[in-house]
Amino acid sequence: MIEVMDEPKTTAPMRSLASEPLRRVGPPPLGELPALLIEHATKRFVVGRKKKSVTAVNDVNMSIRRGEIYGVLGANGSGKSTLIRLVSTLLTLDTGRVEVFGNDVERDEMKVKQLINRVSVDAAFFKKLSPHENLAYAARLYGLDAKVARAEAITILARLGIGEKRLSRPLEQMSRGMQQKVAIARALLTSPTVLLLDEPTTGLDPRSKLDVQTFIEEVRDTHDATIVLTTHDLAEAERLCDRITLINDGRMVAEGTPAELMTMVAERYGKEPTLESVFMTFTGRSLDDDHDDDKNEDDE
């Protein structure tokens, strides 16, 4: 079902984990709760020398079903990454609430951390260490068996196109694409039931991007994972996402399946049935537009 939140514009206008290792917990049975529920989420920042208040996330509401790949599209500075940080407990809400399988991100923070993991556009590593050493550190942090984690990491990286021979090379000697694949492997080691992917293919070469996109589909199909994906790549969103929401100036402006949104702009607004026309219809902006007010806080 298509939901239009506002009339479209026609002109351009970790925190550290707890000291005790995390233990995996399973999601509730199918059909009981949404994987991710966001109600009236709002987050403001004070930025710049003039201490200007900027609302990066403005009264956002989402209900994401278990097993979905849910896309969040928006131009630079629109609030996408801030929203992901709110879900992942890296930021606190000003108003509203966020729940992961019924667990409140503020009241039940540790339970939420047991259910989620996040891959950002700029993954943080110990760059002098190898992929194996970085993954071993992550496994130990989460209380995983080192041998089991190593075997699983080798399997995941092989599916992403990284052979075992490369696991001992320092990460600083690896390409951006290879590093991002290691970041995805690190996230999957913890078997998250909600995987937050914040522009995971930005800056990757075409082959690496295809590898990651294919793997995202495999994760959804084989790991019973719900995936929230922010992306600038409209073709990627159309290929991967079951539903899409468009965010502009921190607000949701439309939500629906890619097919629904494209059909709507064609029939209602007489536009070409593409995701690019959907994006331009509802935001009046280019995906590469910067928003000076909040780009320091929302580094998309």
Image: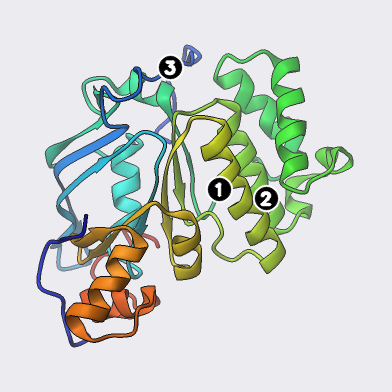
The residue labelled by disc 2 is 179
Examine the rendered structure and indicate whether residue 189 appears above or below residue 11. Answer: above
Nearer to me, 205 or 132: 205
Kindly identify the amino acid type of the residue bearing the numbered disc 3.
Answer: Gly
The x, y position of residue 88, in whole percent, is 36, 36
Q: Is residue 274 left or right of residue 247?
A: right
Examine the rendered structure and indicate whether residue 4 appears above or below residue 139. Answer: below
Residue 189 found in image quarter: top right
Q: CA distance from mark 3 to mark 1?
A: 26 Å
Q: Is residue 42 left or right of residue 228?
A: left
Q: Quick one: SS at disc 1? A: loop
The residue labelled by disc 1 is 123
x 55%, y 48%: residue: 123
Mark 3 surroundings: few (<14), some (14-19) or many (≥20) residues within 10 A? few
The residue labelled by disc 3 is 26
Which tag, 1 or 2, sits closer to the chain's start?
A: 1
Specify whether residue 80 is in view. Answer: yes
The reply to whether dot 3 and dot 2 touch (C-beta < 8 Å) is no
Mark 2 surroundings: few (<14), some (14-19) or many (≥20) residues within 10 A? many
Q: CA distance from mark 3 to mark 2?
A: 28 Å
Which quarter of the rendering shows the N terminus? bottom left
The x, y position of residue 160, in whole percent, is 71, 46
x 38%, y 77%: residue: 274
Kindly identify the amino acid type of the residue bearing the numbered disc 1.
Answer: Ala
Which tag, 3 or 2, sits closer to the chain's start?
A: 3
Q: CA distance from mark 1 to mark 2?
A: 8 Å
x 35%, y 65%: residue: 259
Nearer to me, 296 or 147: 147
Q: Quick one: SS at disc 2? A: helix
The reply to whether dot 1 and dot 2 touch (C-beta < 8 Å) is yes
Q: Is residue 218 left or right of residue 30?
A: right
Kindly identify the amino acid type of the residue bearing the numbered disc 2.
Answer: Gln
